[in-house]
Amino acid sequence: MTPPARTQAAIELLDQILAAAREGGAAADTLIARYFATRRYAGSKDRRAVRELVYSAIRAAGDRPETGRSAMLLVADADPEVAATFDGSTHAPAAIAKDEPRARPGVAPQWLSKALRASGLDGAALTALAGRATLDLRVNTVATTREAVLAALPDAEPTPHAPDGIRLPTGTNVESLPLFNEGAIEVQDEGSQIVGLAMQAKFGERIVDLCAGAGGKTLALAATMQNKGTILACDTDRMRLSRLAPRATRAGATIVETTLLNPTREREALADWQERADGVLVDAPCSGTGTWRRNPEARWRLTPERVSRLQSTQQHVLGVAASLVRPGGALVYIVCSLLDAEGTDQVSWFLGAHPGWKVEALDLPAGAKHGQGIRLEPGRDGTDGFFVARLIAP
Ligand SMILES: C[S@@+](CC[C@H](N)C(=O)[O-])C[C@H]1O[C@@H](n2cnc3c(N)ncnc32)[C@H](O)[C@@H]1O
């Protein structure tokens, strides 16, 4: 593909991504994969270049743009080489017209930037939310050591904060590495590894991972527990939860059981666990404002109504979790969001609704105190954004 044809392909893809953001359709990565599945003439360099253009345009536009072209013009404004590809030739975008409208540049839609500022993020800390993510993995210490993995992977380096983390060059095909297939490594952002440490899971304990999804944090807990004890991994999403069992098998995490929950009827399925868990992890469904480095188009999908619905779900899940914790046991609340409405405010709500519970101070390898817990920020900590708090039952 010629450089102008790559720009045109990126514009077409952006139009599809915008439509999906408006209508709740597929994620950008899925749309990019589908686009190239039917365009065999595009080689790997073309795909990489188009993908890079698409993501640069997504990162540049704060509000959801009207058209893909208006977003790509932001990239052209910053890069003369891209501007030169708007030459009107065959398969190229039309020449840029004088005063042609651009998408609004910015970190996020205005209502969201305002809410993030009110949550204490401004300037570089705000801009970093839509920056670029590193490729981090967690070493499965049940199977091996970080030193052994670093010795086997010359391109890898230790992550700066997480004790079992390694970092690989972005774009590394992790699934093709023998260590991955042997269960020695799992892709997991360094921030996700760090907030999981707040559970302080110990050898032999009984832990519930209430919102386990495909088990990213479940597997880390199993490793911390040296694969001794019990972890009950639950979720309401059958598809996500079904991905956990094969991952656990690969990692040799034999202490993990799974339970599919019916939303609003979780307590029936968890009747045997009432007040019996040493710890309950609530990695709650959230707006994901801390993960825009990976899904920058998620900024265009969020609405105030959606945040408010998520807050209700978070409170509901926190209530279910509280009923499972034994007296003196711990509830760890995590969101990959930097909005106080989903983080520290939810802890305040919980303390008001559950008399006798106390917040316990956390000492984690990164992050800083924020309200009732600890916050990790992409700008300061180089991780995805997270809020985490640890609560102790009366
Ligand atoms: C942030 S994700 C979990 C990610 C996962 N813990 C990890 O480390 O990869 C939140 C999960 O909560 C689940 N969820 C939503 N409502 C729930 C409910 N009422 N009970 C349990 N899980 C729920 C979602 O399906 C989603 O998988």
Image (spheres, rainbow, N blue to C red):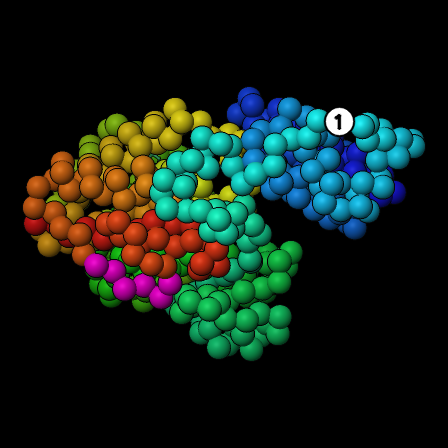
- Say which of 176 and 302 sits in front: 302
Classify the position of ligand 1 by quadrant: top left, top right, bottom left or bottom right.
top left
Q: Label 1 belongs to which residue?
A: 100
Q: Secondary structure at mark 1?
A: loop
**Residue 166, relative to residue 232: is it above or below?**
below
- Say which of 35 and 228 sits in front: 35
- Quarter location, residue 69: top right
Quadrant assignment for the N terminus:
top right
- Quarter location, residue 346: top left
Dot 1, how many residues are within 10 Å of its Cα: few (below 14), some (14-19), or many (20+)? Answer: few
Tell me if I can see residue 215 in this picture.
no
Tell me if I can see residue 305 in this picture.
yes
In this rendering, would 343 be left or right of 301?
left
Q: Residue furthest front?
A: 99
Residue 365 lies within the magenta run: yes
- Quarter location, residue 117: top left
**Residue 270, relative to residue 20: is it above or below?**
below
Residue behind label 1 places its C-beta within 8 angstroms of ligand 1: no
What residue sits 77% from the left and 35% below the top? Answer: 9
In this rendering, would 233 be left or right of 9?
left
- Say which of 91 and 217 sits in front: 91
Q: Amino acid at mark 1?
A: Glu
**Residue 346, relative to residue 303: is it above or below?**
below
Q: In this picture, which residue range is highlighted in magenta?
A: 361-366
Q: Main secondary structure of the magenta part?
A: loop
Image spot of residue 11 (x, y percent): 74, 32
In this rendering, would 243 be left or right of 180?
left
Image spot of residue 294 (x, y percent): 54, 46
In this rendering, would 85 be left or right of 330?
right
